[in-house]
Image: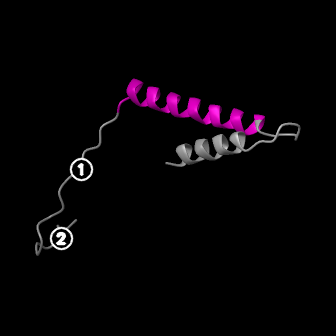
């Protein structure tokens, strides 16, 4: 949700820009694109190195804990 909000805010800022005034949008756009690239790399890594999570059910209610 946050990347969409940032994109909308940047787009609104660009649309409201008055010609002739200095802008400092380049670093923001660069960081936004780097974040998008990072998300892409994370998704590719999750497919390249899949992992499994095994969950065990808790003991039945009222059962005493097992002695160690």
Q: How far apart are marks 1 and 2 (CA)?
A: 18 Å
Q: Position of residue 67 (x, y in %)?
A: 19, 68
- Label count reads 2
Q: Residues within 10 Å of mark 1 (few under 14, many from 20)?
A: few
Main secondary-structure element of the magenta-colored stretch:
helix
Q: Which residue is rendered at x = 11% and y = 67% of the image?
A: 60
Identify the element where label 2 is drawn: loop
- What span is colored magenta in the figure? 26-50
Tags 1 and 2 touching, CB below 8 Å: no
Per the image, the residue denoted by label 1 is: 55
Left or right, 66 with respect to 28, comes to left
Is residue 54 located in the magenta-colored stretch of the structure? no
Disc nearest the viewer among 1 and 2 = 1
Q: Which residue is rendered at x = 52% and y = 34% of the image?
A: 39
Per the image, the residue denoted by label 2 is: 65
Image vertical order of residue 49 relative to residue 3, above or below: above
Q: Which residue is rendered at x = 60% and y = 36% of the image?
A: 35
The quadrant in which residue 66 appears is bottom left
Is residue 39 located in the magenta-colored stretch of the structure? yes
Q: How is the image coloured?
A: one colour
Query: Which of the two residues, 40 or 12, is positioned nearer the viewer here?
Result: 12
Q: Where is residue 42 in the image (x, y as percent from the top left)?
A: 49, 32
Q: Where is residue 38 in the image (x, y as percent from the top left)?
A: 57, 32
The quadrant in which residue 54 appears is top left
First in sequence, mark 1 or 2: give its number.
Answer: 1
Left or right, 41 with respect to 9, comes to left
Image vertical order of residue 55 relative to residue 47, above or below: below
């Amino acid at each position: 949700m946050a990347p969409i909000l940032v994109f909308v805010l940047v787009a609104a800022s660009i649309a409201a820009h008055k010609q002739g005034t200095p802008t400092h949008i380049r670093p923001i756009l660069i960081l936004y694109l780097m974040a998008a690239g990072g998300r892409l790399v994370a998704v590719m890594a999750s497919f390249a190195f899949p992992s499994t999570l095994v969950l065990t059910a808790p003991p039945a209610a009222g059962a005493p804990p097992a002695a160690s």
